[in-house]
Image (tube, coloured by chain):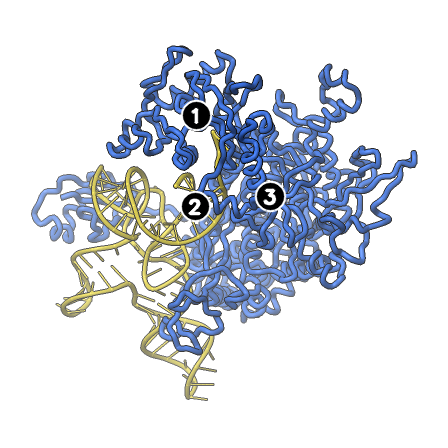
Amino acid sequence: MEYKFWEIEPKWQAYWEEHKTFKTENDFSKPKYYILDMFPYPSGAGLHVGHPEGYTATDIISRYKRMKGFNVLHPMGWDAFGLPAEQYAIQTGTHPAVTTQKNCDNFRRQIKTLGLSYDWDREINTTDPKYFKWTQWIFTKLYNTWFDAEQGKGRPISELPIPEDVKAEGDAAIKEYISKKRLAYYDNAQVWWCASCKTVCANEEVLTDGSHEKCGHQVKRKNLKQWLLRIPHYAQRLLEGLDNLDWPEGVKDMQKNWIGKSTGAEVDFKLEGLTENLRVYTTRPDTLFGATYMVISPEHPMMSEIVTADNKEKVEKYIQAASLKSDLDRTELNKEKTGVFTGRHAINPINGKQIPVWVADYVLMGYGTGAIMAVPAHDTRDFEFAVKFEIPVNCILDPKDADEETRELVLAGKACWTEDGAYINSSSSETGIDINGLNKKEGISKVIDWLEAKGIGTSTINFKLRDWLFSRQRYWGEPFPVIHWEDGEVTVVEDELPVSLPDLEKFEPGEGGESPLANAGDWLTVVDKNGRKGRRETNTMPQWAGSCWYYLRYIDPKNDEQIFDPKVENYWMPVDLYIGGAEHAVLHLLYSRFWHKVLFDLGIVSTEEPFQKLFNQGMILAFAYEAQSGAKVASDLVEEKDGKYFHTQTGEEVRQIVAKMSKSLKNVINPDDVVEKYGADSLRLYEMFMGPLDDTKPWAENGVKGVSGFLGRACRFFGNLDNIVEGEEDKEVLKLLQQTIIKVGDDIENLKFNTGISALMVFNNLAMKKGKVTKATAEIFAKILAPYAPHLAEELWQLYGNTDTLAYASWPVADTSLLVEDSFEYPVSFNGKVRFKLAMPMDAPKDEIEQSVLAHELAQKWLDGKTPKKVIIVPKKIINVVL
RNA sequence: GCCCGGAUGGUGGAAUGGUAGACACGUUGGACUUAAAAUCCAAUGAUCAUUAUGAUCGUGCGGGUUCAAGUCCCGCUCCGGGUACCA
């Protein structure tokens, strides 16, 4: 049989579609396996070769699990809200829904040509009102939930106890109190504004150079009323939940860093001339004796009381300057600390000494208490500041294990030491505390005990994680089910979902940075039954919203009554394996986990975590070329000669490098082209054969040719019935077949697809060498090839006379009795160097092996008449003679 | 700066502390062909020597543990990703 993939592949794709081969039923009697891809944003550019990498991996596992008897849930959908469709609408007037529909159709078509076994009846689309009805519904749940810190869980807002003193103040105070507890709230927020996208963005979307990750333009600070989510309430739970997840350690670390838990203490400092204390947060209460000044952030609420009249002018000037700094300025000035003295002094509670209070923008209002005690001798930032403003540096921790030069500098206050050591100058007869000689750990706990006993400090935990800015000034997103009434009341509607997007003709933003929805006249205004007028929320939700919970909707995608049927959810959740790119390590995965935990607390989902096992596929790069000057050269201007590369026009030799695929480098690979030239099975196989799934690796067309050659050989051999014979199978073939069954199965379980394919190749090579195999062998080969190259496998399966699809044929079981050997060929080494081989019976005792080795004629050369010091015999491994 | 990864032939990559380089690409030689492509067969880490054959060196660098290290430990170099005044 010639390998006509262009005929085989459409044939089987049509068969699977027609027979709904991959439709998933809720058959609770079977063990389930939920395997999920990160669903794509359907861009106008279509699929790139990075998409099929993860999709093929999950498809292989899905097909394998089905053959192993699992009920497999393997769905696909579209994360289809987003900026590009809206920008296209502004330019051309084409409604984003039209563009989105077109792009989804194209993605679906492309994905179908890859032969991926999705249950298309479960396809979802985040922009479908039937879908976002439930995104809005979850928002109302967040709004109506408060976090009970005592129980450590979210609870319905109706169960929130109202303190008596709040009750006494009346309804307005109660409302205010409740709104401060909700997980979703509407408030003034300092936000990042992107003038180019005309929208705010979350902290997470702003890169460290102050640019917007989506468009690259600089963002600015702005004060706007926005929706925010109180994700920090779940910080501890989000942190602890990571422990039991089978996730890459790197991703867990990134989430841990992002959550940023730190333990320390809050300490109150008395301020001279004021009754109110200044509270600071520090992770190093042990260094209180070394505090020589304090710093408050420019936004500190006590600023006006703290600043003395003499200093008011220069402090105000400084605050003004700091507030105008863009993020870029802040980073650029990162190394150069700025600040001014407030004129006020505080009293260090541990030794009664007077220290100055400064204001500086290296202290952030959003973290801790917005004020610090500065210990320049033992904190690098404080040290830099102190050096610049000539503030004393008092060393109180002897770095006794450091090298002598460093130690001298630290003791003299000329260098900073943040590591462990032994305290000096750390006692006070006045306050009665003495930690001299202790180490860091002992010092911290002793000082905290002392602070708590004196009532001037408490041990405290802080997180870096901030409230999540959850609204955007865009059209193409989920509308908030929210109405702002003329009397100032804000209501969240729950009973008329979905709140659909109005049809617009124009998609330009509204006045003053409002979303385009501000122009939607009829839609915008509402009137209640009492004639009160209201205005709908014009912000929309960020793209994260739809992707936060989509895995739950696949479970019961057509349910109009409920978000899903709990019985079905209970069966399918959690997701057993989730594969996608590492770029979502923090944002998407953290946000999803947060929503999921809230839904869990409310009893809506049955598991605490959504994704049991996570795996990141690596990026697929491409070869590119670089001239001697370092300038990149487009791939179509490069020719190869004798393994070297030359510029076709200048003749200059260029260097081959590995880079991201980009239009400018002309090295973008389009999966459609690969499918057309080599077939989907070859594309699938090559993407898996390139290397470990989680590695970044360059695309090489010759590699596709290689695996395509393998499929061609397999097809010509196993597809030729002349080679398929009756009778007993050859012993060598039979043995290798058992080994291959085991290897291919194990490698799929462990996501080591490259070596699994290699095993299939090895088996094919042997079968071809033998020239014939039995039908039983051929059928097993078709089965174990099926997850990787399903089209070819189905074709072979049918050729052998099977009338049903191979998709649910049972995975073969290896007969391990065929693998039992009666002898083992030992490599015999002398002083670690292998010199010859020696076959010994499997159960030969060690002394017999030793005798045989030493008596062996080849051994004499290496023994050279000497008596070995030792003979190491590792059964079924190796023999080492030590001379 | 800090936190994670990684470094193996000409190339992509294999190797529970136990024969380094599976499998594939590329290259070379051969078969088939008028020829090319396709296909098939063989060789292919480097160096030295050669009569089949053999020896030496080899997993980024320097040390160490071990009978035995690509693999474990210590100290570096380079590359990739994340993060950044979080007190």
Q: Is A1 in front, or is A122?
A: A122
Give the amino acid type for the residue marked by disc 2 in the picture. Thr
Kindly identify which numbered label has been placed on residue A284.
Answer: 1
Give the amino acid type for the residue marked by disc 3 in the picture. His
Mark 3, residue position:
A588
What's the colour of chain A in the image? Answer: blue
Which SS class for mark 2? Answer: helix
Give the amino acid type for the residue marked by disc 1 in the picture. Arg
Q: Is A228 in front, or is A159?
A: A228
Give the crowd class for mark 1: few <14, some 14-19, many >=20 residues within 10 Å: many
Q: Quadrant of the N terminus of chain A?
A: bottom right
Q: Which chain is yellow?
A: B
Q: Quadrant of the C terminus of chain A?
A: top left
Kindly identify which numbered label has been placed on residue A816.
Answer: 2
Residue A7 location, quadrant: bottom right
Give the crowd class for mark 2: few <14, some 14-19, many >=20 residues within 10 Å: few
Q: Is B35 in front, or is A333?
A: A333
Tell me the CA gap for discs 3 and 2: 45 Å
Tell me the CA gap for discs 3 and 1: 33 Å
